[in-house]
């Protein structure tokens, strides 16, 4: 149980979020429950990049605010979405690896509850909930939500199981009696589908909390943060949590780094990843280029960069060095416990051969 009052818990959860639907609903939950149920869902689908550091930081915020937090590993959802060669066995290997990733990023296993989708799908009441969500949702609305799985509406014409995915994700929240559903901004349509269906069904609507999506290192469409987000499918556009310092520096050196803050992936890493874990960022550089710099807040770093007092390459090098330091515990974790990461790499190599 948290020792904070409702306002302090709200401020902690709201920190660095893109939106809360709705703030009033969240405050009501916090005032009425000492230990509400929080949720985030993942498809086990590949290696984990630093976008997860935004997620794990927010999960820690929820736990510190007194939440019982469920990390939902959506194995059958990933199967519908053709992940990892369409093999449920591969997907479950990935689910084990993802639990390692959470722990390596500072979320102890005892602080959250891991649930596989398989574990609730044996319950006939779950499938009743899926059907009731379907009855409360038009086909057009469901197909519009398919972007949560990186699919277009047209793909349902070839594989009708794709339309089950949004219904199942919405049903997950209702069936598990979730108070707050958390995710990146790309999960907004699923959470809104769940809220709309819950209202028609006359059951509790989960509050939706969304954090920004970390952009890929190569940049992208600034007007569409979902399409521009960091993706594990682009090896040089993403940094994995167990990458070596050399790989981090190499990838960061090629990163898109415009002379503005909007759409700048390097500044985004500083804002949403590094300053969330460190009060001060120290960038080392030769005296002939002005010497070392220290920044005590993201705003200070952004002002300095936009004023032209910090060269893009110095920003990249400094960010890479600090990020490598922050990720050292994750790398050390996988040195101590390499089994699931090795299974993932071997399995991904086999999946690649089949393409």
Image (cartoon, grey):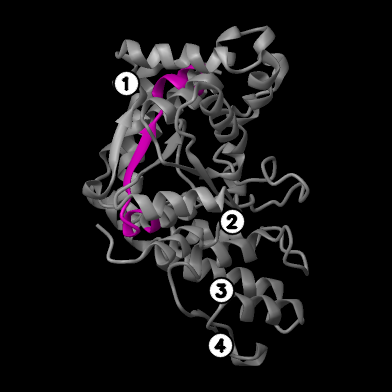
Residue at the image position 39 percent from the left and 61 percent from the top:
6
Residue at the image position 34 percent from the left and 47 percent from the top:
102
**In the rendered image, which quarter contains the C terminus?**
top right
Can residue 250 be seen in the rendering of this structure?
Answer: yes
Separation of residues labelled 2 and 3 (CA atoms): 13 Å
Separation of residues labelled 2 and 4 (CA atoms): 22 Å
Label 2 or label 3, whichever comes before in sequence order? 2
Task: Locate residue 267 relative to residue 77 in the image: left or right.
Answer: right
Residue at the image position 63 percent from the left and 77 percent from the top:
299
User: Can you tell which mark lies on residue 120?
Assistant: 1
Residue holding disc 2: 251
Point out residue 3 in the picture as x, y percentages from the top left corner.
Answer: 27, 66
Point out residue 157 in the picture as x, y percentages from the top left corner.
Answer: 69, 8
Secondary element under disc 2, as helix, strand or loop, is: helix
Q: Quick check: marks 1 and 3 in contact, CB under 8 Å? A: no
Task: Locate residue 184 relative to residue 93 in the image: left or right.
Answer: right
Secondary element under disc 1, as helix, strand or loop, is: helix
Q: How crowded is mark 3: few (under 14 residues within 10 Å), some or many (20 or more)?
A: many
Q: Residues within 10 Å of mark 2 (few under 14, many from 20)?
A: some
Q: How crowded is mark 4: few (under 14 residues within 10 Å), some or many (20 or more)?
A: few
Q: Residue 76: within the magenta?
A: yes
Label 2 or label 4, whichever comes before in sequence order? 2
User: Looking at the image, which is closer to me, 291 or 102?
Assistant: 102
Q: Nearer the viewer, mark 2 or mark 3?
A: 3
User: Can you tell which mark lies on residue 318?
Assistant: 3
Q: Quick check: marks 2 and 3 in contact, CB under 8 Å? A: no
Residues in magenta? 61-83
Secondary element under disc 3, as helix, strand or loop, is: helix
Q: Nearer the viewer, mark 1 or mark 4?
A: 1
């Amino acid at each position: 149980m948290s020792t904070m009052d409702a306002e302090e818990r709200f401020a902690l959860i709201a920190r660095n979020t893109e939106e809360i639907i709705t703030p009033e609903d969240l405050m009501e939950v916090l005032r009425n429950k000492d230990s509400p149920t929080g949720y985030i869902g993942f498809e086990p689908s590949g290696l984990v990049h630093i976008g997860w550091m935004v997620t794990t930081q927010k999960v820690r915020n929820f736990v510190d605010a007194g939440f019982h937090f469920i990390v939902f590993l959506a194995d059958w959802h990933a199967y519908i979405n053709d992940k990892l060669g369409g093999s449920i066995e591969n997907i479950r290997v990935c689910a084990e690896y993802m639990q390692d990733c959470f722990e390596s990023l500072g979320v102890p296993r005892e602080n959250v509850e891991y649930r596989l989708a398989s574990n609730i799908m044996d319950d006939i009441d779950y499938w009743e909930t899926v059907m009731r969500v379907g009855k409360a949702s038009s086909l057009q609305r469901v197909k519009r939500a398919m972007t949560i799985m990186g699919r277009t509406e047209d793909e349902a014409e070839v594989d009708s199981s794709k339309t089950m995915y949004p219904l199942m994700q919405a049903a997950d929240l209702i069936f598990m009696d979730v108070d707050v559903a958390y995710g990146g901004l790309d999960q907004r349509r699923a959470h809104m589908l769940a809220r709309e269906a819950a209202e028609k069904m006359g059951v509790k609507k989960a509050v939706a909390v969304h954090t920004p999506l970390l952009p890929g290192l190569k940049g992208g469409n600034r007007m569409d943060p979902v399409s521009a987000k960091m993706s594990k499918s682009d090896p040089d556009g993403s940094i994995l949590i167990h990458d070596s310092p050399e790989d981090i520096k190499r990838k960061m050196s090629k990163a898109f780094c415009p002379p503005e803050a909007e759409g700048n992936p390097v500044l985004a890493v500083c804002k949403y990843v590094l300053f969330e874990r460190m009060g001060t960022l120290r960038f080392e550089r030769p005296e002939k280029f002005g010497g070392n710099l220290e920044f005590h807040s993201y705003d200070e770093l952004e002002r300095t960069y936009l004023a032209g007092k910090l060269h893009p390459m110095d920003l990249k090098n400094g960010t890479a060095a600090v990020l490598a330091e922050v990720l050292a515990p994750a790398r050390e974790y996988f040195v101590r416990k390499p089994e699931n990461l090795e299974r993932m790499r071997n399995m991904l190599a086999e999946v690649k051969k089949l393409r």
